[in-house]
Image: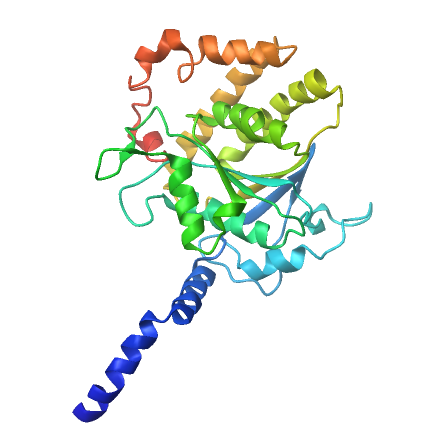
């Protein structure tokens, strides 16, 4: 037995370091972790619940990658079909992913962000266009930034891009944005830094279910200002909103606290948005009044605004 082990061990170790073996290993691991993901799709002003395919694998409220690939070939529903049978778009100009915090362990990202990124990869794979994934987020005002060993800031979107690259994404098909520090900024800077200059019109937006109602409201409201103000086209943009499952992520009271916070923030936004008539109004409001972006409030950036540890656990 000892002789056999001495003969086989060098070949086995060489195989472990062979690039093709590492690729297969990474693919296998990727499929095992695969998308927990799409629980709900929204197109434009309509929202659809998407049932899992009959043969999909469920883990922590997630579905295997295969059903997304097959769903992309399902025809759009007719008037008599269930809305849940709608197809995933395969001609998106870009996939926009909202970051959602960082950790100092593992991939450097919390599980809910990993799920969002897994969904991005799955959606990108079924695109017939050269569709980039746009990672949004510079950080959060609720926690200090993560630093490299040499003291440089690791932006949330950089950590997200690293995660995607480690799972086979091409850097040439990834973009990022580092100016935003909350969901309002995510939508604003996604539009002004990428969507408008890129000439994009068909957009996928991915975030967690608990985060989707406010995300959807912000992107629709801001894009409506852009469409009317800059292009004079009411239907300039088409969105596919994809909510990633929250199942198994938080204790019930943590998720309830986050839902309440999201609802309050959405209500506050709608109040502010009601007085905006153009992109200039949005720009002024953001940079003159918002805690994360107004110079007059920059001294508040490190002030603790979330004191509930249950709520802070979701950042």
Q: Locate the C terminus by quadrant.
A: top left
Q: Locate the N terminus by quadrant.
A: bottom left
Q: Is residue 45 above or below residue 126?
A: above
Is residue 199 toward the left or the right of residue 140 in the image?
A: right
Tell me the quarter of the picture where residue 40 sits: top right
The coloring applied to the image is: rainbow
Where residue 65 appears, as percent x and y from the top left, is 54, 58
Where residue 298 appears, as percent x and y from the top left, is 34, 12
Is residue 236 toward the left or the right of residue 15 in the image?
A: right
As drawn, the residue found furthest toward the front would be: 172
| Callout count | 0
Q: Residue at x 71, y 51 (%)?
A: 85
Q: Is residue 63 above or below residue 224?
A: below
Q: Residue at x 62, y 58 (%)?
A: 69
Is residue 129 toward the left or the right of residue 315 in the image?
A: right
Q: Residue at x 50, y 51 (%)?
A: 170
Tell me the quarter of the picture where residue 126 sits: bottom right
**Nearer the observer, 87 or 52:** 87
Residue 248 in view (yes/no): no
**Nearer the observer, 223 or 36:** 223
Where residue 106 appears, as percent x and y from the top left, is 30, 50
As drawn, the residue found furthest toward the left would be: 2
Where residue 257 appears, as percent x and y from the top left, is 40, 30
């Amino acid at each position: 037995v000892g002789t056999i082990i001495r003969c086989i061990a060098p070949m086995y170790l060489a195989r472990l370091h062979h690039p093709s073996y590492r690729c297969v290993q990474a693919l296998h691991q990727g499929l095992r972790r695969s998308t927990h993901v799409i629980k709900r799709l929204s197109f434009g002003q309509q929202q659809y619940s998407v049932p899992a395919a009959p043969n999909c694998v469920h883990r922590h409220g997630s579905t295997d990658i295969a059903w997304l690939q097959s769903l992309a070939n399902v025809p759009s529903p007719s008037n008599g079909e269930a809305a849940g049978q709608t197809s995933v778009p395969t001609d998106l100009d870009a996939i926009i992913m909202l970051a959602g915090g960082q950790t100092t362990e593992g991939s450097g990202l919390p599980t809910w962000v990993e799920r969002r990124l897994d969904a991005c990869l799955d959606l990108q794979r079924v695109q017939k266009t050269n569709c980039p994934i746009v990672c949004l987020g510079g950080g959060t005002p609720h926690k200090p930034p993560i630093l490299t060993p040499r003291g440089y800031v690791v932006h949330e979107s950089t950590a997200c891009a690293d995660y995607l690259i480690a799972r086979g994404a091409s850097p040439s098909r990834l973009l990022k944005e580092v100016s935003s520090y909350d969901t309002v900024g995510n939508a604003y800077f996604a539009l002004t830094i990428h969507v408008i200059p890129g000439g994009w019109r068909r957009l996928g937006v991915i975030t967690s279910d608990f985060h989707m109602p406010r995300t959807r409201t912000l992107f629709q409201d801001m894009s409506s200002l852009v469409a009317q103000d800059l292009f004079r086209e009411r239907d300039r943009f088409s969105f596919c909103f994809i909510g990633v499952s929250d199942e198994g992520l938080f204790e019930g009271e943590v998720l309830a606290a986050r839902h309440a916070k999201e609802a309050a923030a959405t209500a506050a936004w709608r109040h502010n948005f009601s007085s905006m008539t153009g992109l200039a109004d949005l720009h002024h409001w953001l940079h003159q009044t918002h805690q994360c972006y107004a110079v007059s409030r920059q001294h508040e950036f490190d002030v603790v605004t979330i004191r509930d540890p249950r709520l802070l656990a979701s950042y």
